[in-house]
């Protein structure tokens, strides 16, 4: 039997899909932010998750993966990933109502840094000095972004801004925990199943918040929320497609293009002017994240060379 052919990579297409997914997710967040003054975060989670499901199902049907893509060998793993991910989403959506969009985006960059720590704690992954140093650098950046919001007193942040910063940081913590669950799920589960069951779990769990102040949205708000859900599904498809087309080490750094999009939307749509403190902290976080991705890429190449050099054992 002939050996399996390596999956062809199309870097330009992968990067294009990645940038489109980043843009779609930022637009989705801006739609949620536009409704946050009236619509509770739990209700926004419902719209974001429920209206993503039809998009994902149509995509799977188009790829003829509807039957196989939703099979699961670990339903409880999906449940726990869904619980943690839904909490992260709810906290993040709530934080959008208190802080500028670029600031929420910058604090959200703490998630991959925290994932490194949690993966070492819960999965036993080895973390060497280089990655530890990058995590420390990134967390310094997070503190720089957070400090103006958490410093209460005359001429400093309000209590509501401090509360919003705490919500967004909590969202990053739970997002990192969700990634730990995903790392375990990928050992037995396909991408389609992980995406679908998360949306299904989040939709169901969001209904728990129904007694806590859901409102009847205006037609305009309902339209924005439905569009946010549809875009969430499209964004997930684009994200998945980007990793099909090119190596993760190539496309992952383009996550940080979200800051450019967030700054533009924040300035032109919400009249949010970024501070130099926020930009400086974000720069440190982005630098740390890119360094970790670069290091992982180098280690991946090294491991590949070692496997290639090994002689088969008889």
Image (cartoon, helix red, strand yellow):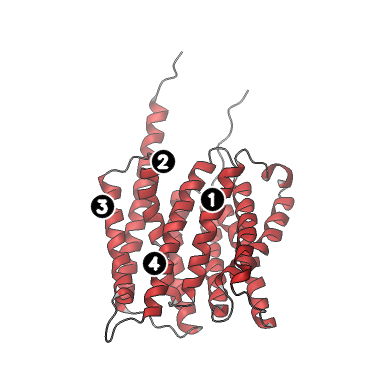
Q: Earlier in the sequence, mark 3 or mark 4?
A: 4
Disc 4, SS: helix
105 and 171: which one is in front?
171
- In the rendered image of this protein, does residue 141 appear above or below residue 312? below
Q: Earlier in the sequence, mark 1 or mark 2?
A: 1
Residue 194 in view, yes or no: yes
Residue at 71% in and 46% down: 65
Name the residue tied to disc 3.
133
Disc 3, SS: helix
- In the rendered image of this protein, does residue 310 appear above or below residue 224? above
Disc marking residue 107: 4
156 displayed left or right of 111: left
65 displayed left or right of 235: right
Name the residue tied to disc 2.
123
Name the residue tied to disc 1.
81
Disc marking residue 255: none
- In the rendered image of this protein, does residue 128 appear above or below residue 265? above
């Amino acid at each position: 039997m002939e050996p399996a052919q390596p999956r062809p990579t199309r870097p330009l297409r992968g990067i294009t899909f990645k940038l489109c997914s980043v843009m779609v997710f930022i637009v989705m967040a801006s739609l949620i932010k536009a409704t946050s003054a009236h619509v509770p975060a739990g209700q926004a989670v419902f719209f974001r998750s429920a209206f993503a499901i039809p998009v994902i199902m149509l995509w799977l049907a188009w790829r003829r993966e509807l039957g196989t893509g939703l099979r699961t060998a670990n339903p409880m793993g999906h449940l726990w990933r869904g619980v943690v991910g839904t909490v992260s989403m709810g906290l993040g959506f709530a934080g959008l109502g208190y802080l500028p969009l670029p600031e929420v985006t910058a604090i959200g960059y703490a998630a991959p840094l925290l994932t490194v720590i949690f993966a070492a704690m819960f999965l036993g992954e080895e973390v060497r000095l280089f990655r530890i140093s990058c995590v420390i650098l990134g967390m310094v950046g997070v503190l720089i972004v957070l400090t103006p919001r958490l410093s209460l007193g005359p001429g400093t942040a309000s209590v509501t801004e401090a509360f919003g910063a705490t919500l967004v940081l909590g969202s990053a913590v739970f997002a990192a925990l969700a990634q730990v669950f995903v790392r375990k799920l990928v050992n037995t589960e396909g991408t389609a199943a992980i995406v679908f069951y998360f949306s299904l779990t989040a939709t169901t769990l969001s209904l728990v918040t129904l007694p806590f102040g859901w409102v009847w949205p205006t037609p305009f708000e309902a339209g924005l929320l439905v569009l946010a859900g549809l875009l969430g599904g499209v964004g997930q498809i684009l994200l998945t497609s980007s990793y099909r087309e090119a190596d993760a080490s190539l496309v992952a750094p383009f996550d940080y293009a979200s800051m450019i999009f967030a700054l533009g939307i924040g300035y032109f749509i919400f009249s949010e002017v970024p501070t130099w403190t926020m930009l400086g902290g974000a720069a440190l976080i982005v630098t740390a994240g890119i360094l970790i991705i670069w290091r992982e890429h180098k280690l991946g190449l090294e491991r590949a060379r070692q496997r290639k050099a090994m002689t088969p054992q008889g």
